[in-house]
Amino acid sequence: MDPWSWRLWEIHKAGVRRVYLSPSDDHIGHRGGARAAAGHQRRRDFDDQHHGGSVLSYDIVICGAGSAGSALAGRLAAIRGLSVLLIEAGGSDEVPQVMTPEQWFLNLDSERDWRFHAEPGAGVGGRALPLAMGRVLGGGSSINVLVWARGHRSDWDDIATEMGDLEWGYEAVLAIYRRIEDWTGTPDPRRRGIGGPMHVELPVDPSPLAPALVAGAVEAGLPAFEHSNGEMMEGPDGVALADMIIRNGRRQSVFRSYVTPMLGRSELRVLTDATVTRVIVENGRAVGVEIHYNGRVEHIHASLEVVLSTGAVNTPKVLMQSGIGPANELRGLGIPVVADLPGVGRNYQDHIAVSAIWESPQPVVGRNNLGETIYYARSDPALATPDTLGFLVEAPLPSEENAARFGVPEHAWSIFQGISRPHSRGRITLTGPDPDDPVRIDAAALSDSEDLRAAVAGIELAREIGNSPPMRPFVRREVMPGPLPRAELEDYVRSGAGTYRHQSCTAKMGTDEMAVVDSALKVRGVENLRVADASVLPRVTSGNTMAPCVVIGERAADLIARDHAL
């Protein structure tokens, strides 16, 4: 298939401003006569009110083809007669940098990255951290480090307790994971799935560094597991080779896994290079979206629902530009208030991390995703669950500041040591009412003293693992940080801190006044509008966020199908 054939139509063609691409009455009729007729009447009413002519119209409009949006679109497209539009701001994923696992880092700061930056933060020495986010079919699952990490049992059970909804609990989510996965490793029928859309495997022919680091972590007191998404995610600590979304040496993004097999169905359309700027709300009901496409502003109608899956930065931005957010701030920007939700943009979280680096006596040849081992650990033995995580990186990965201070040898490898349960909370705010006005991202990285404590404990653990006997064949010397006094080690962490790029939690589920969505992912105060991405997490999960986003997309599909009897 021609990689650009996902542009399945051109809105501007032969001078026609809008093209009506809604299914025929007979096609809609597969969903049931009365409900189909009502939806068709809503579309006619919308057409009469907007521009006096026909508009693009679908039953479900999904904004964002990232991990959650792709899973949602793939599941809904399987429902006969349901018309689904998936809108993506980026373009094709058919490029070597996306499809070749070891080239993932070449996507950062490219046209496939939104290229967000946080505001300079005191907790990270006044630096402005880059915050990559996918702008391509597949979103983050097309540019990330390809690690499949489900989150800890306690992550999901905490959500269920907070929401009073067992469908978000670990056992319920485990059942969703079993239907998601096509796991190729050692069978584990209770915890792993076979035959699902997401191909998940252990690294093929891993670097010798990877099993050595597993052995080094065992020397440091962590138990080893055959895989990282089974029993390991139910206990306090563990190390394993990382699960990956690689098949036959090629990246298997969520878009490739869920959407590509459905592209031949009449139920699904995918539009690339189209940026959603706001949700159109009438009388408290979401009826469509406004997009920037091909240099023009266009409207698309949704007869049943609009779903925002644009990520933890763009989702609150679109909500606020639509008049959904903190009322006083919106009025100050001249944006009419549709729903006063003070929690929109609040509660921002990410996994902050810093590298420890060793010089290698021989060249390091990276394999698979260049980071094949993962571990979780407690920074304090009194904790019941892990609050730090570490990854092997088969290359040096310093900050510019620490590279200038310590130097970086030609041959080196790293442990990227992070905080898996951050206490710091940041915020997304608008800088103006225009869609082209950038958002302000206060990441608040390491602003909470507890995060600094956990980061220091984590880097001390990383040093213990990296300097352990199993790692000695791969070590000429420790490059950084070395045995620094406590105060200097804190400075090292602040000057070296980066991020795993797991931005999340800015439109959280909850029952308090700061909640943006309920347990059904519905935006409070606005009908027919849901959010399905990492924004809805009350707290970032304990690891990479791609797999949890697929769960969120699956949950959204179940909820939409249930609510509309599809």
Image (cartoon, helix red, strand yellow):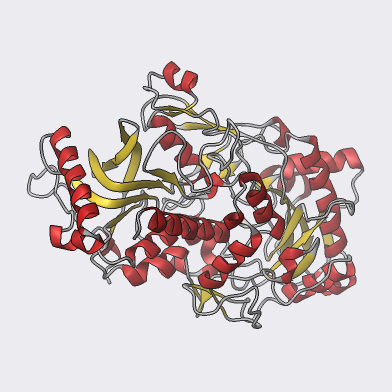
Write the residue at 62% across / 34% down: 426
User: Residue 219 or 347: which is nearer the viewer?
Assistant: 347
Q: Residue furthest top?
A: 332
Determine whether, in the image, residue 201 is placed left or right of residue 98: right
- Residue 356, image x and y in percent? 78, 55
Vertical relation: 267 (above or below) 488? below
Vertical relation: 53 (above or below) 397? above
Vertical relation: 479 (above or below) 284? below
Q: Can residue 169 be seen in the rendering of this structure? A: yes
| Quarter of the figure with the C terminus | bottom left
User: Residue 106 or 116: which is nearer the viewer?
Assistant: 116
| Quarter of the figure with the N terminus | bottom left
Vertical relation: 514 (above or below) 490? above
Q: Can residue 138 be seen in the rendering of this structure? A: no
Q: Residue furthest left?
A: 14
User: Residue 221 or 94: which is nearer the viewer?
Assistant: 221
- Residue 492, image x and y in percent? 79, 43
Write the residue at 69% across / 74% down: 227
Write the residue at 78% across / 66% down: 238
The answer to which image quadrant residue 265 occupies is bottom left
The answer to which image quadrant residue 268 occupies is bottom left
Write the residue at 49% across / 74% down: 196
Determine whether, in the image, residue 81 is placed left or right of residue 193: left
- Residue 509, image x and y in percent? 56, 43
Q: Residue furthest front?
A: 34
- Residue 306, image x and y in percent? 35, 46
